[in-house]
Every structure is written in C-alpha cells, then in structure tokens.
Image: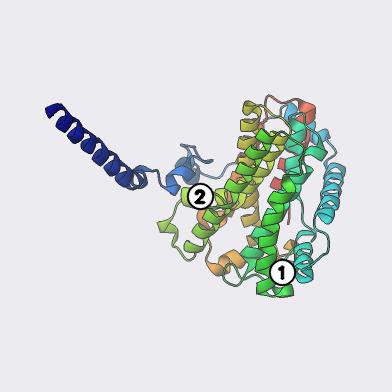
Amino acid sequence: MEAQILFLYFSLLVLSLNFLFQYIKPRLSRVFQPSLETQAKAAILSRKEVAEFLDSPIVEVVEDEDIYTTSSSTFDFDPYMTSKADAVNKALEEAIPVGEPLKIHEAMRYSVLAAGKRVRPILCLASCELVGGEENAAMPAACAVEMIHTMSLIKDDLPCMDNDDLRRGKPTTHKAYGEGVAILSGGALLSLAFEHMTTAEISSDRMVWAVRELARSIGTRGLVAGQAKDISSEGLELNDVGLEHLEFIHVHKTAVLLETAAVLGAIIGGGSDEEIESVRKFARCIGLLFQVVDDILDETKSSEELGKTAGKDQLLGKLTYPKLMGLEKSKEFVKRLTIDARQHLHGFTTEKVAPLVALTNFIANRNK
C-alpha cells in the first residue's frame, strides 16, 4: 500500500513538472532567444572592422587582379544579359496569361512585364549553371523570384508604405489600377510564384528545400522584417543608429531575395551543400552591394535617369548608407563588397564563374 502511495505521489510530481515545463518553455525561449538585431549581425557583417572602416580615412581600394577578374573582363556580358532577360521575359509572359478576373491579371502583367533589369532571375539561372544545372530547370524558380520581387515593389509603393508614384519609368500599380486592385494583384503574384515554382522537374527533396528557402525570404525573417524595420526607423537621428541597424534593414529588405534567387538556382542545379553555401555567401554580398549602390543613385541621379522617384529616401527621412557614412565612404564600401563577393566564388571553374563575376561588376557600376 505504501509503495502504491509513493508511486502515485511520484506520478503527480512528474506530471506537475511536465506541465510547468510546457508552460514556461515558450517564455524562456523568448527571454534567451537572440534578438533580430543580434541575428542580423551574423547575416553578413561578421566583420570586426566595421567601426574601424567608418572611422578610417577614405582610401582608394585597389583590386588584386586574379583569374576571375581577368575572365570577367573578357566575358561578353551585354549579349549574355540580353539573352537571359529575353528568356525570362518570355517565360513570365507565358506564366501570367490574360484571364479572369481581368483587372487583376492586367495589373499583374502591368507590374511584372514592365522593363526591369531582371537581375534576380538572371542570378538564379547563372547560379544553376554554375553548379552544372540547365537553364530550363531553374526557369520556374527564376520567374517565381521575379514575381515575388514585383509583389514587394507593389506593396512598397502603396500610400501606407513609401507612397511612390513612379516605378520602372511608369506610374506605380496603385496609381494605374487603384489601391484595391494593386493589393490583390500583389497577393495573386505571391500565390502564383509558389505554384509556378513547383512545375520545375526536380526531386521532391530539392523542391521542398527550395520552397522553404523562398518562403523564409518573404516573411518575418526576410522582406517583411526589413520593411517593418525600415518604416520604424524613419526620422531617427544618426546618433540613435549604427551600421548594423542599417544593415539589418537592407539584408532583409533587399539582399535576402537576391540571396534566395542564387540559392534556389544552386539547389535546383544539383549543387552540393558546400557549393550552395559558397553561392549563398556570394549572393549575400551582392545583395547588400545592390542596396548600397541604390542608395548612392537615389542621391546622385534624377527621377528621369532612374525611372523612379529620386531623392525620396531623403524626403522620408529614411536611413541610407550615404546618410550614415557619407557619399565617398559609401563608394568605397561598394568596392570592398565587390571584392568580398568575388572571393566567395573561388573554387568554381573560371568559365562558369565568369557570368556571376560580370553580374557583380554590373551591379556595382550600374547607373539606374
């Protein structure tokens, strides 16, 4: 009898401890989980030299010539870019046919088929070919990334966000079709992106991996996090923020989708874990590079040259690299990121790496 009572008490103790653990576990995880700021620091700037870089005098960054810079200088990039962009445009045209509801499909096509640079889908295709894959295998993923990028532009341009009137040289989607249609067309593009990507003929394991990567890039660990931080940072004084704060915004708002485009290409192309990780680090660098250049252009070019409203960041009190570190220091940062990006491609063959090196140079030297 005594043994039974002891056993009963012991069982009650175990059940109570289990209940207590289940109750406090979520709260403990929230207390001890690293903040988004901390996670962001590991995203790209695991650089101890950030402070030194900001405090150091402006210097001319001299690039060491290697087989990668040499191969890219001989690589005929313009025809490559034109050919890939044409293939992407054709695939996007076929992926979004005109149909009912007519206004929604018209708005989707208006936004997606506008004259964009197609950097993200081309990055996806080039990364697939880098690891030995074929362009046609990665085309559905390349289109999916462009659809999601366009969706993010539609949302960014809305009056409740950045309130922009001009995009890709045309009136923004909400200006052309109204806010309601713009919001619905953005949602439709998001949905279609995943549906379309699953038409790629790859193994189910790789497809699940690719879908997970793409989904993660959009939500609170990607685009949404960057946009939320961007909105909450408007009007902040420079004394209140640092480079890590600004980088969190741009790693999540801009770099993450460029990174994902490249990673999707490498996954679909059959890349090894090591190859995919190298591609990820490379793309993370050029993603940040893209944004630094964007910030510089916003300050130095006109709306006519850019095809979108120039000087809007300054008007809204947004954080930018020129605002935080000055124009000349930002240009130096562009050169450093260009070099960093290329270094992550070491280990791949010169011939296959040439398009990506040339694409890096294109992003660094673009004028709109």
Q: Which residue is mark 1?
A: 173
In the rendered image, the vertical position of residue 192 relative to residue 62, given as above or below:
below
Residue 106 x/y as whole percent = 79, 67
Q: Which residue is mark 2?
A: 248
Q: Is 17 on the left-hand or right-hand side of 273?
A: left
Earlier along the polypeptide chain: callout 2 or callout 1? 1
- Which is more foreground, mark 2 or mark 1? 1
Residue 215 x/y as whole percent = 60, 48
Q: Quadrant of the C terminus?
A: bottom right
Q: Residue furthest left?
A: 2
Say what secondary structure mark 1 lies in.
helix
The span from disc 2 to disc 1 (Cα, nearest Å) is 28 Å
Q: Amino acid at mark 1?
A: Thr
Task: Evaluate if marks 2 and 1 touch, with contact meaning CB atoms under 8 Å apart.
Answer: no
Nearer to me, 14 or 198: 14
Q: Amino acid at mark 2?
A: Phe
Q: Is residue 359 visible?
A: no
Nearer to me, 85 or 75: 85
Q: Quadrant of the N terminus?
A: top left
- At x 64%, y 32%, the residue is 276
- At x 83%, y 53%, the residue is 89
Residue 142 x/y as whole percent = 74, 46
